[in-house]
Amino acid sequence: MSKAKAFFYRFRGYILGVLAIILFLMPASPLPSSALSASELPASGLSASFVLCFLAILFYLFGVALRISARRHIGEHTRGKAHEAETLVTSGPYSRIRHPLYVSNFLIACGVVVLHLGASPWVFLFVFLVGAFEVALSRMEDSFLEARFGEEWRNWAKVTPAFIARLPVSPKTNASNPEKRSIWRAFVADTSTWAWLLVVNFLLFLLKIF
């Protein structure tokens, strides 16, 4: 990995932090309860703000569920400031897509963006930036894994899409996958992520009420 790529990967968390700060500087959308008065509600009884809030929650739920599922299978791979991988993980969500953690990051980020900005056109810009960021990280990881595992990775990559699963599910490989964790152990393994998400959502709430 080149020095530029190594720097990008090492400080990926700080880059996301900068994007989050820029996002928080944008005007917050109103809370669903204050978006419209009772007399202004459409016939369906649902405001656009409420629908967008519900959509953001769906992004959160799918992202969190996918992240926990991936953590059950991946062990301690690529944690911290450098790429690390003792084995090529191809079980669980890794039998369907190569980068479930990056997909989960994108889904959660979409939830944050939609919850904060609502129907603002700026949503598309932030979604694009986060998507491009995760794609860049995934390509670096692909390069690292190919160099690390060679033909084994190439055979897996041929039948396993990067982000969008296809049917039928990719056939199992002969890779020696890490021992599968319990849901609780997988959740605890990502304590820093959940703490970051809790802080972000607390700040989002404060921005909406003040």
Image (cartoon, grey):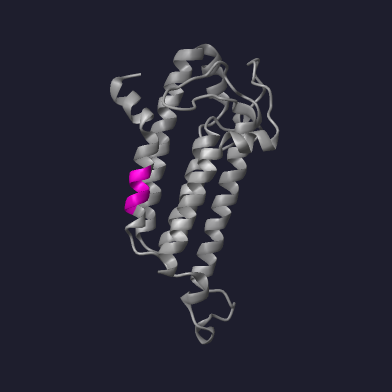
Q: Nearer the viewer, residue 39 or 182?
A: 182
Residue 198 higher or lower than 71, as above or below: below
* Residue 191 in the image, given as x and y percentages of width and height: 56, 39
Residue 24 position in % (x across, y down):
36, 56
Q: How many marks?
A: 0
Figure check: 125 above or below 141: below
Viewer-side residue, 197 vs 177: 197
Q: Quadrant of the N terminus?
A: top left
- At horizontal 47% and vertical 59% (from top left) the residue drawn is 115
Magenta span: helix, strand or loop, mainly?
A: helix
Residue drawn 58% across the image and 37% down it = 165
Relative to residue 182, is residue 62 drawn left or right?
A: left
Could one spot residue 85 in this view of the protein? yes
* Magenta segment includes 18: yes
Residue 97 position in % (x across, y down): 57, 32
On the rendered image, what quadrant is the C terminus found in? bottom left
Asked if 100 appears above or below 129 in the picture, the reply is above
Does the magenta segment cover residue 138?
no
Residue at 64% from the left image edge and 20% from the top image edge = 177
141 shown above or below 105: above
- Residue 114 shows in this picture: no
Q: Residue furthest left?
A: 4
Of residues 11 and 129, the one nearer the viewer is 11
Range shown magenta: 17-22
Residue at position x 68%, y 37% in the image: 184
